[in-house]
Image (cartoon, rainbow, N blue to C red):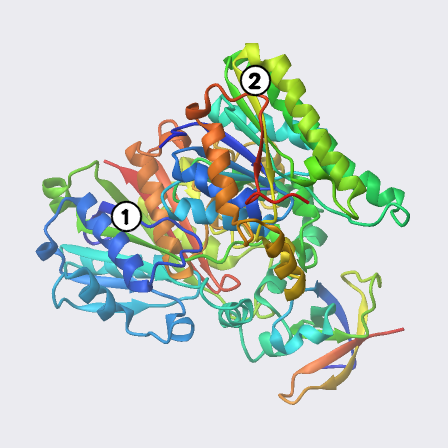
Amino acid sequence: MLRSVSVIGIGETRMGKLTSKSIRMLIKEAGNKAIEDAGIEKERIQALYMGNYNASYWSIQSHIGALASETLEIGHIPTIRTEGACATGSLAFRQGLNAIAAGIYDVVLIGGVEKMTHKPIETITTGLASAADFEYEVNLGSTFPSLFAMIANRYFYEYGDVRKEMAMAAVQNHDNALLNSNAQMHKKITIDQVFNGFPVAHPLTVYDCSLVTDGAAFVVLAATEVAEKIAKKRVVEVIGTGHAGDSLTLAGKKSITTLEATVKAANEAYKMAGITAKDIGFAEVHDCFTITQIINTEDLGFFEKGRGAKALAEGKTALDGQIPINTSGGLKAKGHPIGATGLSQINEVVTQIRGEAGARQIKNANIGLNHNLGGTAATCVVNVFKGR
Amino acid sequence: MNKKATIYTYSIIYTASEDFKDQTPYVIAIVEDKDSRVLSRIEGYEENKEIHIGMEVELFKTDESGNPIYKFIN
Amino acid sequence: MRLKDKVCLVTGGGNGIGRAAAVKFAQEGARVVVIDLNDNAIDETVNSIVENGGEALGFMVDITKKEQIAEMVKVIMEKYNRIDVLVNNAGIIMDAQLKNMTDDQFDKVIDVNLKGTYLCTKAVVDIMINQNYGVILNTSSIVGIYGNFGQTNYAATKFGVIGFTKTWAKELGRKGIRTNAVCPGFIATSIIDPMPERVIKAMEDKVPMKRLGKPEEIANVYAFLASDEASYVNGAVIEVSGGIVI
């Protein structure tokens, strides 16, 4: 990176079915939290990078960048909205990061927001499907979950049946979410309940799928040399970042059990940080579905290909495990407000590194990672964070 | 694409979008023919029908958009 | 904030009276555990509590299954290390006149309403004894006092729950645990949705107050009984029915 960049402020709303909160209110709440957390005057913010997936469809509202800067009263600064399906939040983060690294700005605000729960399920399903290929996948009857269901079935074929471990991932994420007051789900579930849940697309039941969520999450980024002077709390440096792409269609991918975009983005981030996967202490990974969590931990290099399920079953990714995964509860239990998810993951990573995670605090949290996928891994962003 | 192809992976859809909800449960699959793969629907699914990766299916028709639709071989 | 920090379990907390009780308890500062069979209903109750700044957690548990109850209690104790209040509100109806009732209808209602209440209470009683503190609130019904046409099974369970209440009041009173029963009358919950207008009107006419009760009005009584304001109320059976006699 040209210039080192650090996180100096974080803030997010509770995630869930927030009927009484509009997009504006979500932005106002999370944005102001982050700015206050950073301890800076609003005048210091030089640009705003917003991530939002589908307000254009679900709320007939585009141009979220301008909406956010007006709502937050941060002045008539440059704004932009990014979109990359479920990787949207991390993409917004990366845009802001790149701008500071290149020396264009010193301090930027980055936010993600999504409002989804106010629409009927058919409208949500249709909106979600546009993260896949409409012409070659959705038009033929694919639903977004069915694409990952196909990934699961192929994974079983290549590496063995991991249905039980997928259910364990859901149970583990729900357990973690019990300790996260911002999580959508505060509900204990069991493996049997996952197996017997409402079938969505074989082998996935409703409990294998992440949630429909409203929420917003913001981050304040600053050049590290500036951060050291102005930050109120422990500065968390972005020591590595990676961004990779792959085909939009599932059929167009070389392999659907090794998600190449993850592998590439992770390698780019690790190389930049001068580390290997072994150095990562904990991670927020993109568990849009339970099978994805298992695959992600392999593609990120935490476990060998085909061994992610066993590692999970052995407790290696639990809160007290060797590499805690999704301590926030993940997309499965904390929630998945699409445009905000990547930034919510970053909120969790920073909270852990600062030692502010309360009941779900990991010991010695110092190097953490967030991993964000878009579509069936057509886009991937990986960021590595380290406490200073 | 030849008339026959094999199943590379599949799923049975129980929860569908508005346009397809009258057809559930139905099978969606990525079918493979030599080295090329394409996503398609496989018609002729009945509950508890045995499906496995590697199974042969055959081209049935193309839809209005020109996408190939396959069916199970009986 | 009469229930500040009290860990309160509400079975059947997914809707109707159970949900109203869960929400009311949360408003009074309680840490609420919502127990139900219906997943979405649990989420909605938990969500409506958390949205208003309260604390709640949900479990999908079949109260006729001892192991599920035990597993749940284990998790609650790991998190909170105490259980202060148990509201045995979960219940079902399967109405038929005696001459038409099937054994299955009989057994199912007994299993959930009577045995389920027994199993849940048994699962927490030792914890409450150790604490020298606890409140057990049993949902009976006016049917548990007057009986009702077509409710052989339901009436037996609602009379039975009063039996539990008076017995547990005697056994547990000295252990710092109070047990009481609440008998709701005709309450406007989703159970009456399928009933025709004229039937509802007839029900309302029978009530001296000339209206159905609201779930919140039952919840208010639960909240009082759960709190220390009811510190000397033990073994009581309280009708909340607008004065109706059926």
- Foreground residue, C121 or A387? C121
Quadrant location of the C terminus of chain C? top right
Task: Say whether residue A353 is left or right of residue C120.
Answer: left
- Foreground residue, C193 or B6? C193
Observer able to see residue A333: no
- Foreground residue, C135 or A214? C135
Q: Where does label 1 land, which residue?
A: A11
Instruction: Tell me which amino acid carries mark 2.
Output: Ile
Instruction: Tell me which amino acid carries mark 1.
Output: Gly
Q: Quadrant of residue A281?
A: top left
Q: Which mark is residue C127?
A: 2
User: Share a chain, discs 2 and 1?
Assistant: no
Q: Residue furthest top?
A: C174
Q: Position of residue A98 (x, y in %)?
A: 24, 59
Secondary-structure class at tag 2: helix
Quadrant location of the N terminus of chain C? top left
